[in-house]
Image (cartoon, grey):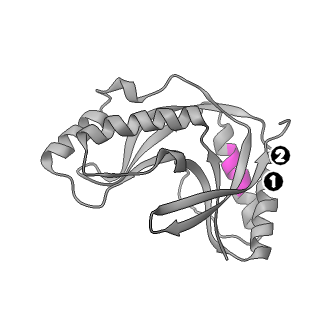
Amino acid sequence: MTRTFIALEMNQDQQRHLEDVIRQVARVLPDVHFVEPAGIHLTLAFLGELNDEQLAQATEATAWAAQQSLPYSYRLNRIGTFGSPHSPRVIWMGIEEPTGALLRLHRILNQQLELRGFATDKRPFSPHLTLARVKRPLSPLEQQHLQALLSGQQTTITSSTSYSVHALNVMKSELLRTGAHYTVLRECPLKNC
């Protein structure tokens, strides 16, 4: 069985930018558990534990969806949270992709997965990159610092750089004592790549 998800990988420039963002946020929230920048990716579908036949079907669906999408670009645009602003569960970096290509790719991928019998997430797609998982309530001072970040008082966190997407990846996730380890099982190029 293979713990599988479909995602966009981050290139080295993105990882460096995210490392800088994490460093800035960690200065004001030092007790929060931040993820390793090298492991950050944009998940489009989490499929869970798959046998070899299911993995082949998921790979086929991913390759088909990728071939229906032209390359596109996006920007990292803001810090946000999931959960209450006073007690967030996740701190994330948002994605800005004005053409709608990412949302179309997500929709096509979900359709192809459903055609092959996979259950897909029915919640609205909220493209983001997880920066931290918050395991305990924040102190009042930490809440104040987080609110300053969320209100945009620290403009060095956003990036004007555009990042190009040329492939969709079938990923394997292994949960180890040292943390999650991710492996690209198959890179599926977008149309004309």
Residue type, numbered disc 1: Ala
Labels 2 and 1 touching (C-beta < 8 A): yes
Left or right: 170 in relation to 25 = right
Q: Residue at x 57, y 67 (%)?
A: 174
Disc 2: which residue: 67
Residue farthest toward the front in the current orientation of the protein: 178
Q: Which residue is drawn at 60% across and 30% down?
A: 98
117 to 186, vertically: above or below: below
Left or right: 113 in relation to 154 = right
Occupied quadrant, residue 120:
bottom right
Q: What element carries label 2?
A: helix
Disc number for residue 63: 1
Residue farthest toward the right in the current orientation of the protein: 192
92 to 115, vertically: above or below: above
Q: What stretch is highlighted in magenta?
A: 104-109
Task: Specify whether residue 92 is painted magenta.
Answer: no
Q: Residue at x 79, y 67 (%)?
A: 57
